[in-house]
Amino acid sequence: METLTSEYREILIATARHYLKNSYSPYSNYPVGAAVLAEDGLVYGGTNIENSAYPSGLCAERVAITKAISEGNRKILAVAVVTRNGGAPCGACRQVMREFANLDMPVILTTIDDGFEEEFTLGDLLPRSFGPDDLDRK
């Protein structure tokens, strides 16, 4: 697992908690906040944004990653996710993480009230993954 300093860990969790407050989740009533540490050392946050046409919604993790990528980053070093019950990222979010992160990247799951915190690697959450290195690029 890549080294994640306690300072960055605290910043990631605080940023994810901040963005959770902006959640637009009237259909699931399941707010999520996320934050990513990008290769430039900046932290980018995001929240889930639902839509009445369900497939058009966005997960907090993908919002945060997309913000980092749109700013020119191509590598994510760590992710924090905050929910009311410590929920893990969905499969689509795990696959997007895989595109821009190593399998040893830390993924921190925590709750709104500090009552729970777990850390996994992306490889733990997405075993036998398919990524950019699996494609034959000539």
Image (tube, grey):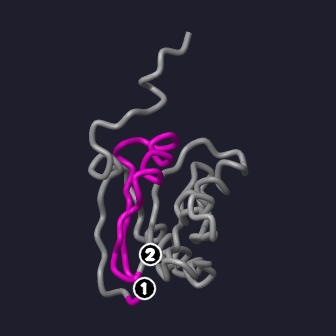
Check disc 2 and give the amino acid type: Val
- Please state the horizontal and vertical placement of residue 76, each as a whole percent of the image: 52, 49
- As helix, strand or loop, the secondary structure at mark 1 comes to loop
Residue 113, relative to residue 136: is it above or below? below
Disc 1 versus disc 2: distance between alpha carbons?
6 Å
Tell me the residue at 63%/69% (across/down): 51
**Where is mark 1, residue-wise?**
112
Tell me the residue at 42%/78% (across/down): 83
Q: Quarter of the image containing the C terminus? A: top right
Within-10-Å neighbours for mark 1: few <14, some 14–19, many 20+ = many
- Please state the horizontal and vertical placement of residue 110, each as a whole percent of the image: 37, 76
- Please state the horizontal and vertical placement of residue 68, each as a whole percent of the image: 64, 54
Within-10-Å neighbours for mark 2: few <14, some 14–19, many 20+ = many
Check disc 1 and give the amino acid type: Ile
- Report the span colored magenta: 84-113
Determine whether, in the image, residue 64 is placed left or right of residue 72: left
- Please state the horizontal and vertical placement of residue 131, each as a whole percent of the image: 44, 33
- As helix, strand or loop, the secondary structure at mark 2 comes to strand
Residue 82, numbered label? 2
Tell me the residue at 35%/71% (across/down): 87
